[in-house]
Amino acid sequence: MTTSNTETTAPSQPEKPAAAPPAERKPASDRPYSPGLTGVIAAETAIGFVDGEKGQLLYRGYPIGQLVEKGTYGQVAELLWTGEWRRSARLVPAVIPEPVICAMHELPDHTHPMDALRTAVSVWGAWRRPHWPPTVDQARELTAFAPSALAAFHRMRQGLEPVPPNPKLSLAGGFLQQLTGKDPDPAAARALDAYFVVGAEHGLNASTFTCRVIISTRSDLASAVCGAIGALKGPLHGGAPAEVVSQLHEIGSPERAEKWVREAIARGDKIMGFGHRVYRAYDPRAAALRKVAEGMADMAGWLDTAVKVEDVVLRIFGELKPDHVIKTNVEYYAAAVLQGVGLPPDLFPPTFALARMAGWSAHAIEQASADKLIRPDARYVGPPEMDVPSFSAR
Ligand code: ACO
């Protein structure tokens, strides 16, 4: 697919398959149960396409590798929200409403930045009152506000004043400037922007599904995004890149990787940055971010260790789990990029959330237009009906 930065619309979507006939209302005990909802189709979407077998990721038809090379996060967010690829699309950091600053001042010292971001979005929702159905304007405002809020929290926890946003900068560059109070290095801003593009959307993952469930009740965008942030906080979803860094520190050198990985797997531990519910091929986002990391100054030593450890891990998985293909996932090289732009590890998960704002809000808009309450069933496995025992009189 060839695309240049000219104004054009997204390619036509593949022909829509016929909708499945409505499920028969058999008792839940007679219907198939899919733990973790694996393989269950719970929505139709025109936003992102993930082919786990081929290792393909498309945003509205465009391959992720091309979007990273040719686009900016502002253009990609607009594409996700509207389906249009516009050269002029931009997102710049927004001013933080005063109630959000006050709320963040009140947070305890030990607050995790993911909790701070969730709180900031919640207070933004109370202040902005983004009523259902979610709109592109609401999505733009929330996506532009979130980096300013996270940067302000990071400064306040160090006893520093928040830095006002500079509307001349991109969202990624503005985030770096609001974290440090200094003009961002253009290469670092571009690398973080690429990370934002890669993290913007990924089909019906756990946090996006959470977001769609909340919007399906006709609740508002801020509530849906708060729920999504909660889902993303878990280490099996968005918490992995920080753990990739500590894992590589623990391993220390590639020579120690073999023993460390074998012992970790034998204990039943998960190797962070590997495995994926959908991908059986190499995660195309990991490939795109590895390229970005290779172009970053000062990352050569870290990357060399990361690449060698990756080779060892993939070989061991191939040997120990021949029936379950486990490859590198996005988080492995996300760790390199986020570290390379100077972020502390505890800001990795909320920075992922900043990137995913575009995808969450695009799904919220799409779900609202379908306007169908999401309400699956559970298979009951508890005791059969019985009488409540009477207490004997004393
Ligand atoms: N380390 C060790 N074993 C693994 C790993 C891993 N990273 N990934 C999968 N496996 C093993 C499981 O233990 C399981 O083995 P078993 O069949 O002997 O019990 C088998 O492979 C199947 O794995 P599941 O956990 O069933 O795969 P699932 O699709 O449920 O999990 C997940 C995917 C949660 C991402 C898992 O691979 C994992 O925990 N990875 C590490 C955490 C991580 O990197 N998360 C980021 C994911 S990317 C993202 O969310 C943006």
Image (cartoon, rainbow, N blue to C red):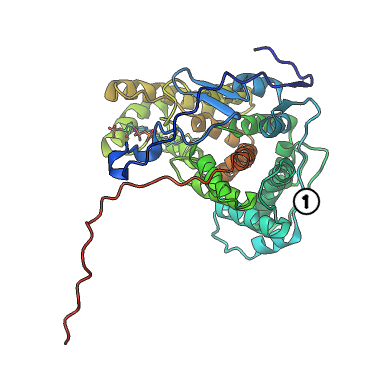
At x 69%, y 59%, the residue is 100
Q: Give the quarter of the figure containing the C terminus.
A: bottom left
Name which quarter of the figure residue 111 lies in.
bottom right
Q: Is residue 359 left or right of residue 231?
A: right
Quadrant of the frame with the N terminus: top right
For disc 1, the neighbor class at 10 Å (few under 14, some 14 to 19, many from 20) is some
Q: Is residue 186 above or below residue 136?
A: above
The answer, for residue 248, to whether it is visible in the render is yes
The location of residue 42, given as percent across then percent down, is: 47, 36
Q: Which quadrant of the view contains residue 274?
A: top left
Up/down of 326 relative to 211, above or below: above
Work out which residue is located at the far right of the displayed protein and give it.
168
Q: Nearer the viewer, residue 340 or 97?
A: 97
Cβ(mark 1) to ligand 1 < 8 Å?
no
Q: Amino acid at mark 1?
A: Val
- Image vertical order of residue 208 relative to residue 7, above or below: below
Residue at the top extreme, as displayed: 2
Residue 14 percent across, percent down from the top left: 58, 18
The correct choice, above or below, for 100 with respect to 148 in the image is below
Horizontal placement of 177 versus 250: left or right?
right
Residue lying at the far bottom of the rendered structure: 394
Residue that numbered label 1 is attached to: 95
